[in-house]
């Protein structure tokens, strides 16, 4: 069974940086896409960054140029470097592991989330 454990969240001032980590246990990491999502209070969960098994990356427009997703397959870990943090980045950040079932892509596994709070 796959388990995902996020770490690295915290309280940071606007303009600061954080690096979130998500360690995966179980099988399938190297052949899976990994994603970072965030959910602010009262808002829907939003996919902010995705990295495929081939390390192709995709970002939602609001974080382009500030967020960088990367993966280390030797450590079964995916990272999210967050720079130039803004108060609107405040949310619980989740990582997820996904893949295709037939022609359908699904996010199959989720971590428990890590809180990021941006405030002065």
Image: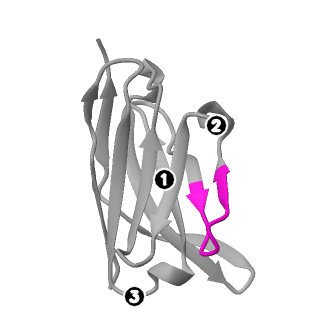
**Which element type, helix, strand or loop, lies under badge 1?**
strand
Mark 2 in CB contact with mark 1 (< 8 angstroms): no
Residue named by callout 1 = 36
**Mark toward the viewer: 2 or 1:** 2
Marks 1 and 3 in Cβ contact (< 8 Å): no
The residue that appears at 50% across and 45% down in the rendered structure is 45
**CA distance for labels 2 and 1:** 13 Å
Which one is in front, 43 or 86?
A: 86
Residue at image point 35% right, 74% down? 75
Which quarter shows the N terminus? bottom left
Q: Is residue 52 magenta?
A: yes
Q: Which residue is mark 2?
A: 64
Contact, mark 3 vs mark 2 (Cβ under 8 Å): no
Task: Tell me the quarter of the image containing the C terminus.
Answer: top left
Sequence-wise, the earlier of marks 3 and 2 is 3
Residue found at x 53% / y 40%: 67
Is residue 72 part of the magenta span, yes or no? no
Residue marked by disc 3: 27
């Amino acid at each position: 069974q796959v388990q995902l454990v996020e770490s690295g969240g915290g309280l940071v001032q606007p303009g600061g940086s954080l690096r979130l980590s998500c360690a995966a246990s179980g099988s399938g990491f190297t052949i899976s896409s990994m994603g970072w999502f965030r959910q602010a209070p009262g808002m829907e969960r939003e996919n902010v960054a995705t990295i495929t098994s081939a390390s192709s990356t995709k970002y939602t427009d609001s974080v382009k140029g500030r967020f960088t997703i990367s993966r280390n397959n030797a450590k079964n870990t995916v990272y999210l470097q967050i720079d130039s943090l803004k108060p609107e980045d405040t949310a619980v950040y989740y990582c997820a592991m996904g893949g295709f079932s037939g022609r359908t892509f699904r996010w199959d596994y989720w971590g428990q989330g890590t809180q990021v709070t941006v405030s002065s």
